[in-house]
Image: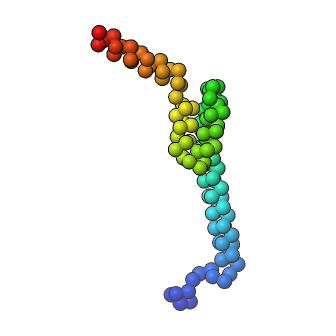
Amino acid sequence: MSLISMPFVGTGFDTGLHIVAAVVLIATVAAAGIAFWKFHEVPIHQAHKNSHQQLTLITTLTWVGFIWHWVWVLAVIIAFVDAEQAIAKVRDIWKSERDSAC
């Protein structure tokens, strides 16, 4: 055996290692794809959980978000922010500023 020779080359064990490597590669790519899909559907699940009024909009934005990722960010914002409470808080802040100015 020389210092340059590779172990397991040309043996059945070499083929087995290639098969194991291929299985690990395919499993890793599949797991990454499934994780990406699950993470990408977070806005839809949040909208279902809260019985959001804009469920169709959030679903559409999530699907379009696969192509344009900034649209997915809009879906996340719409799904997680309660618009009625946000508008009420802005209104209260505006009222308090006007009352203190007078």
Q: Residue furthest bottom?
A: 2
Where does residue 98 sit, x and y in percent of width and height? 34, 13
Residue 11 in which image quadrant:
bottom right
- The answer to whether residue 100 is left or right of residue 58 is left
Horizontal and vertical percent position of residue 58: 61, 35
Q: Residue at x 61, y 41 (%)?
A: 62
State the image quarter where residue 9 is shown: bottom right
Is 84 left, or right, of 100 in this rendering?
A: right
Q: Nearer the viewer, residue 24 or 3?
A: 24
Q: Which residue is more in the foreground, 101 or 82?
A: 101
Look at 59% across and 36% down and name the residue there: 43
Kindly tell me whether residue 45 is visible in this rendering: no
Question: Relative to 82, does residue 6 appear above or below in the rendering?
Answer: below
Residue 33 showing in the rendered view: yes
Q: Residue furthest right?
A: 12
Residue at 63% from the left image edge and 25% from the top image edge: 53
